[in-house]
Image (tube, rainbow, N blue to C red):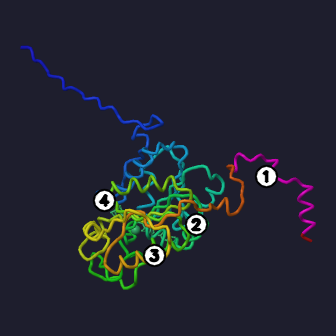
């Protein structure tokens, strides 16, 4: 008896290519080890999409992060990029140093609400104040996810943890803080709203100064229950999208305050100054990458050093 086996047809899908001829796969990282459904994974996908659509050469991208579930995520996008995983809360200092040494690259920093607004608050504010050119994204879930769900400073007063305990302190609004501290592009997003998030990230990646993103990113293991203001359901029910950013800081802050009083969470680009003065302009520093400045220019030589030292005596 002769059996005939029907060979299934293999459908070849042609992958879309960007202006560099790269497919989306070129912007992937290693597989995620986060909990299934964690908001952070959706943000990684949005970052890959934004980099793919902008045709950013992977080797011109620098990924930076601190410590936390959120700070693990740079491993999950654009494997071909440079990366630095700093100690808890100190990533803004590393970002500042990297930008000072090479202003011509794309810098994408990912942090958590704990990493940025608890332990790293001081370093974060100074990086904004200096107007370094970086896309700085906080994956905001209102808890320390990695250490099993303690409240962070972005948790709202009265919000409840899984055991029903209430947070007694007023929340820190990191969007208002960023506007006050000098960030020139300030946006809030929601991990479950990719159609809004991808264009915002593309805009931020093209921005010439500090672009800050507060992205609400529910922690399904420790902060997605009834009674918390950082769950998928709560954010979905209270989101108020804004279609045009403010160009006046104080109007933006007033709008945020009013929205907060009305129980609304404003998303979209909230404040934007399209022409900020970068740190290199402020300090009149050499914009050439440090590695391209010849030694003869970097070292003034023994005679000039002696003269300088004598002038200081
Ligand atoms: C100096 C120091 N203090 C405390 C810790 C413990 N720790 C690790 S991650 C973390 C908080 C992370 O929270 P967040 O930045 O919000 O990230 P998430 O895990 O929620 O994404 C803490 C307190 C640490 N690693 N180092
Ligand atoms: S513990 Fe929370 S923040 Fe961490 S991976 Fe799981 S869901 Fe995400
Ligand atoms: Mg967190």
Mark 1 or mark 4: which is in front?
Answer: 4
Please tell me in which quadrant of the rendered image residue 231 appears: bottom left
Which of the four quarters of the rendered structure image does ligand 3 lie in? Answer: bottom left
Please, what secondary structure does the residue beneath circle 1 have?
Answer: helix
- Between 77 and 242, which is closer to the camera in this rendering? 242
Q: In this image, 222 relative to 130: left or right?
A: left
Q: In this image, 284 relative to 255: left or right?
A: right
**Residue under label 4:** 192
Q: Position of residue 45 (x, y in %)?
A: 37, 51
Above or below, 191 against 9 in this view is below
**Residue under label 2:** 127
Q: CA distance from mark 2 to mark 4?
A: 28 Å
Ranked by sequence position, the earlier of labels 1 and 2 is: 2
For the residues bearing labels 1 and 2, Cβ distance under 8 angstroms: no
Q: Which mark is residue 253?
A: 3
Q: CA distance from mark 2 to mark 3?
A: 20 Å
Picture quarter with the N terminus: top left
């Amino acid at each position: 008896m002769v059996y005939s086996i029907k060979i299934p047809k293999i459908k070849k899908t042609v992958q879309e290519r960007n202006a560099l001829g790269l497919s989306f796969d070129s912007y992937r990282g290693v597989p995620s080890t986060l909990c299934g459904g964690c908001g952070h994974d959706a943000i990684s996908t949005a970052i890959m999409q934004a980099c793919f659509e902008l045709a950013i050469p992977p080797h011109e991208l620098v990924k930076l992060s601190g410590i936390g579930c959120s700070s693990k995520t740079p491993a999950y996008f654009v494997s071909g990029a440079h990366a630095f995983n700093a100690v808890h809360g100190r990533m803004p200092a590393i970002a500042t140093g990297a930008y000072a040494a090479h202003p011509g690259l794309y810098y994408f920093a990912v942090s958590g609400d704990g990493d940025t607004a608890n332990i790293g608050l001081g370093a974060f504010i100074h990086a904004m104040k200096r107007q370094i050119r970086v896309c700085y994204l906080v994956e905001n879930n209102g808890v320390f996810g990695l250490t099993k769900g303690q409240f962070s400073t972005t948790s709202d007063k009265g919000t409840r943890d899984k055991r029903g305990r209430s947070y007694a302190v007023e929340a820190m609004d990191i969007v208002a803080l960023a506007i006050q501290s000098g960030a020139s592009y300030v946006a809030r997003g929601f991990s479950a709203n990719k159609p809004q998030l991808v264009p915002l990230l593309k805009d931020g990646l093209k921005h010439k100064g500090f672009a800050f993103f507060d992205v609400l990113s529910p922690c399904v293991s420790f902060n997605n229950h009834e009674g918390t203001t950082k769950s998928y359901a709560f954010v979905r029910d209270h989101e108020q999208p804004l279609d045009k950013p403010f160009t006046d800081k104080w109007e933006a802050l007033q709008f945020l305050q009013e929205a907060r009083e009305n129980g609304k969470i404003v998303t979209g680009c909230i404040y934007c100054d399209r022409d900020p003065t970068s740190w290199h302009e402020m300090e009149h520093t050499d914009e050439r990458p440090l590695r391209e400045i010849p030694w003869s220019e970097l070292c003034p030589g023994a005679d000039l050093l002696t003269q300088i030292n004598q002038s200081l005596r």
